[in-house]
Amino acid sequence: MKAFDTQTAAIRVSSPSSDLETKVQEWGEKIFSMVEAAGPPSFFTKEGLAGTVMDRAMRDEHFKTRLFRFVDVLPTLTSAGEVARHLREYFDTNQARPASGWSVGLKGASAAPWLLAPVVKAQVTALARHFMLGNNEKEITATLCQLRNRQIAFTVDLLGETVLSEAEADQYAARYLDMMALLARHMAGWPGPCKSNLCPRGPAPELNLSIKISALYSQIHPADPETAIEKISTRLGPILRKAKESGAFINFDMESYALKNLTLRLFKSIFSDPEFESAPARGLALQAYLKDSEADLTDIIAWARSRPRRLTVRLVKGAYWDYEMVAAQQKGWPVPVFADKSQTDANFEKLSAMLLENESVVDAAFGTHNVRSIAHALAQAELRGVDIRNFEFQMLRGMAEPVKATLLQLGCRLREYCPVGELLPGMAYLVRRLLENTSNEGFLANRYARNLGRKELLKRPVAPAAEPRRETGGTEFSGQTVFKNEPPVDFTVAAERQKMQEAIREARRQLGRRHPFVINHQPVSTRDWLPSLNPANQKEVIGYAAQATVADADAAIGAARAAWPKWARTPADQRAAFLEKTASLMRAEKSALCAIEVLEAGKTWTEADADVAEAMDFCNFYAGQMRALGRPERTQHVAGESNFLEWWPRGIGVVIAPWNFPLAILTGMAAAAMVAGNAVILKPSDQTPVIAARLMELFIKAGFPPGVANLLTGAGGTVGAHLVEHPQADFIAFTGSKEVGLKIWETAGRTRPGQMNLKKVVCEMGGKNCVIVDSDADLDEAVAGCIASAFGYQGQKCSALSRLVVLADNYEVFLQRFIAAAASMRIGPAEGPGNFLGPVISRGAQQRILKIIESGKKEATLAWQGRVPNDPDACYVPPTIFTEVPPESSLFREEIFGPVLAVVRAKNFDEALLLANTGEFALTGGCYSRSPANIERVKAELICGNLYINRGITGAIVERQPFGGFRMSGGGTKAGGRDYLRNFMVPRVVTENCLRRGFAPTDA
Ligand SMILES: Cc1cc2nc3c(=O)[nH]c(=O)nc-3n(C[C@H](O)[C@H](O)[C@H](O)COP(=O)(O)OP(=O)(O)OC[C@H]3O[C@@H](n4cnc5c(N)ncnc54)[C@H](O)[C@@H]3O)c2cc1C
């Protein structure tokens, strides 16, 4: 026996005894014999259309995807015509037709949709009703009564946990109170306790509710769990009070991993409150698929030991396995779940043992339908002498009915988890259940669809020796380096939050320093120093930047020109190594760099983190690209001659960068140019010179030779313009406004005396980006994605959403939810960890945007405007939504670069596309739709450089989404893409005749 001593008590866990496996097999055989006598669960015996369709889904992944997507969209389809159209789009393909009669049905659906549509809707509704109860009071109480009559206890869960606004969170909390009142009223007339609630330690509450805490606050932010706990507690308080009054039990369900620590903290904090310390009865779910779960259970048992009231731990395997795998891989985070099913099963058994071992402190509830897992719990209990009625089993409604019947016969206590709600909010739940019932790894499908035998199903789960590698994507460059995106910081980790807080404090200690510009590695001070101000507090000077003159610009060009020849001949591998070193230096001081951005650019924690990560990605990605490009490439092969293409640097470059991605864009353009063998002059924005000065320090520290990178701070109109005109400047890399970009484009086109090269301009300008919300869009996703795209970083991203075209069918409901969500955004200084929206960059920008809003009121209807903190020293602009915006208005056509959104209603999808394609820009665009045909149309017709479907339109990731637009948005170059470096080089071909006196080497 192994013991864990904690401050409060010992957590006891036994290692498996030799008798255990024999007992498990005995229980397993016994349960199987009884289960098999009862026949298969009803889900696996469905007849008619539903039966055929589910049968095919278990055998055909492509069909399963289409089916689940169709089921997901169906409740939003309001007309028979729409149902028929979606049926055709999802299933009228050679791959997806489920049965021969199907094509006839589909043809019928086209000709007479009212015939097929109601049948399909009824079938899917019946499928949903198999797993969840409707919203009808009578249906709910009748079902619970039936359960009780069969001696099955219940726990009720309210569907619709995705809340986008505080109004929705209020509604959700109110629904819980209503539900408790309804059930308490109804159950008062029940004859006596349900047998499954009778425990030797005393009866368990009859009224049992399960709750998802994320539904009680719409603005949960990973960096600010404290506010989340406070807000959720405020809404939970009345629910717990009512539960106390009604003698009810409250269980916290466990949701995605991102919410796990928050859920545990909230549970402990609220049930330590003197008001709730002793009542109501409480419990929480723990997921055995999580690698952390053993530590969490240890912790919760230790905590429970110090509490006046017992708690129940519902042990489950976990319902979000696929999501957790994808989410971790997309972010490049360690995968929190076990990768192998047997590891989850083995861990479930280990935690079951821990629960039973510590039954003096916690009540165990085993939430599983798996006969092996159940047999194991029973065997453990038997060996430990734990009364079978001292713990309970829990199962989901609509699943594993024969197993439920068997457990009752065996005298076990059984609780059914009953989700309640409308079809629409219940879709996520339904899809999770369908996935579970059709999963290749799932116990039920293996038993009833794939007919695996008892022996196989009762096998002891043995975790594989080494966890299978499921790596996130990395790109190999010619077998040399592997590029991986820098993962974002996970602010749910307390240490990361502390690190950031400390970095901000440290950045504050460094405020007000003078930052000379740098030529040839030499700092140059000037008489004039321009202050860089905190957008959230214009009295706070972040630093002072030296102001270069035209003569300084000439000196910088001279330094670059002098350094260039040697740098150009430095091997590509060496140049790449300097960039990689820069990235690693950035990693070492990531939080310090983020802190400067928070204070100088008004970036929130997550935005600043993303910017610094992107800067690192640019360095590493371009380094890898250059290593590949640095090797001459053979062109057409012919005997006796060698032909190679190679890339030469262009010369001297001027890099002019904006303030909105103050590190990433400056780094990206400079890194690409330098690694390609050019020498550069960096000209950052006047608004963010301090972060630019830090970058220059890093370039020097990384080992770039003097003169290769030079930094000039100063007025764009004079110094910047002079650099662009300079005959010795060979190319310009610019990101910024259309106005300046066009001027640069034009100026660079004029050849000046002494100029040796045609100037290349790499030019990225603005956008007036549009998202279409289709009539069948998933509004939970569309609202959240559009809020983030329109108002993230106060709308000051060139990729930001500024025109929203909503299909008429969805318009009212979308707008109502969207405005409620906007009204719930947290607004405040960027350094406040939970703030979503901060001030705009400067007083000038604030005044300009406020003016646009004023004149916008004459062009369109002001539908909503947020309230910002009343702080005269900060540059806040209230987030603003206009509706009825005429397509010809400036509100609809001109870039604003602030938190202002134009919303337009479109009659149909044709009109939506027409509206979206209006205007001179083509940067980002997006569409929320669940119509395969409309998605294809958007792909083919929406004019933009980066198109995003069913997600937000900002946040491009290096290599994954090479970024940049065309038309008046830019020259079509793609930053972070595979071709980007070629913009900074010229190709040349070297041909050598290898034939000497008729003899040619074979390898030529
Ligand atoms: C009453 C009740 C309440 C529940 N509450 C919650 C809750 O609050 N939160 C929650 O997340 N879930 C909850 N669940 C859902 C539960 O997680 C699933 O129903 C359960 O995982 C299915 O497990 P099983 O033992 O019945 O089936 P099995 O078929 O034995 O196990 C399936 C499970 O194994 C895991 N798995 C599948 N593939 C892999 C793989 N390749 N590698 C590793 N693991 C894998 C997954 O967790 C999957 O759900 C609850 C279930 C019940 C019965």
Image: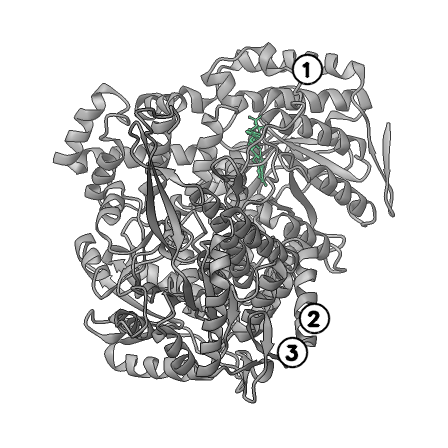
Question: Residue 231 in the image: x percent, y percent?
Answer: 60, 63
**Ligand 1 closer than 8 Å to label 1 CB:** no
Question: Residue 751 in the image: x percent, y percent?
Answer: 27, 71
**Which residue type does callout 1 highlight?**
Trp
Please tell me which residue lies in front, 566 or 627.
Answer: 566
Residue at point 43%, 75% (across, down): 866
| Sequence-first disc among 2 and 3 | 2
The mark lying in front, picked from 2 and 1, is 2
Residue 562 to residue 774: above or below: below
Please tell me which residue lies in front, 281 or 693.
Answer: 693
* SS label for mark 2: helix
The mark lying in front, picked from 1 and 3, is 3
Residue to which mark 2 is pinned: 506
**Which residue type does callout 3 highlight?**
Leu
Question: Residue 886 in the image: x percent, y percent?
Answer: 21, 71
Residue farthest bottom in this picture? 527
Residue 30 to residue 780: above or below: above
The label shown at residue 27 is 1
Q: CA distance from mark 2 to mark 1?
A: 62 Å
Please tell me which residue lies in front, 262 or 944.
Answer: 944
Please tell me which residue lies in front, 685 or 170.
Answer: 685
Residue to which mark 3 is pinned: 511
* SS label for mark 3: loop
